[in-house]
């Protein structure tokens, strides 16, 4: 079973990783991950406008930044310790 973590330590770690990431695609993954963490923590009313669009798998999109952001968002929704895929 996957362990869920507290919101604040996950956000702190993700922020540090995002700021130190040299690869812009991976940095975008971290940005999406943090948004997903916020959605998971604050609930359904957070980020209503973009939530459905971000749940759509974007790996086939031509824009690697958007695809990475979406993958990160979906990973953040789990409230689990994750790294870019």
Image (cartoon, rainbow, N blue to C red):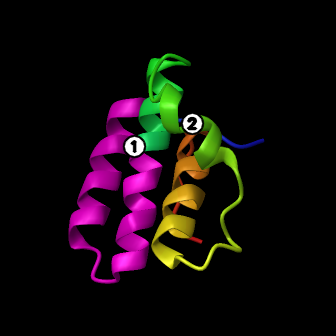
- Residue at label 2? 51
User: Alpha-carbon distance for marks 2 and 1?
Assistant: 20 Å
Q: Are marks 2 and 1 in contact (CB under 8 Å)?
A: no
**Which circle, 2 or 1, is nearer the viewer?**
2
Q: Nearer the viewer, residue 10 or 54?
A: 54
Task: Find residue 54 and report its horizontal and vertical position in percent.
Answer: 59, 47
Q: Position of residue 52 (x, y in %)?
A: 64, 38
Above or below — where is 48 with respect to 25? above
Q: Check disc 2: other Cα within 10 Å, few if <14, some if 14-19, many if 20+.
A: some
Query: Is 44 placed left or right of 14 in the picture?
Result: right
Q: Which of pointers 2 and 1 lies earlier in the amino acid sequence?
A: 1
Residue at position x 39%, y 43% from top?
10
Q: Position of residue 8 (x, y in %)?
A: 33, 33
Quick one: quadrant of the C terminus?
bottom right
Range shown magenta:
7-34
Q: Which residue is mark 1?
A: 10
In this view, the residue farthest toward the right is 1
Secondary structure beneath label 1:
helix
Q: Is residue 24 left or right of residue 44?
A: left
Residue 84, relative to residue 35: is it above or below?
below
Please rate how many residues cluster around mark 1, counting C-alpha atoms within 10 Å: few if below 14, some from 14 to 19, many from 20: some
The reply to whether the magenta stretch includes residue 28 is yes
Horizontal side of 19 relative to 80 (left or right) equals left
**Residue sitting at 24 percent across and 59 percent down?**
16
- In the image, residue 24 above or below residue 70: below
């Amino acid at each position: 079973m996957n362990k869920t973590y507290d919101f604040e330590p996950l956000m702190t770690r993700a922020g540090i990783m995002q700021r130190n990431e040299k690869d812009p695609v991976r940095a975008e993954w971290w940005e999406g991950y943090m948004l997903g963490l916020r959605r998971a923590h604050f609930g359904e009313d957070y980020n209503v406008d973009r939530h459905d669009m971000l749940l759509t798998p974007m790996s086939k999109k031509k824009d690697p930044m958007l695809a990475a952001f979406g993958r990160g968002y979906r990973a953040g929704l789990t409230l689990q310790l994750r790294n870019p895929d």
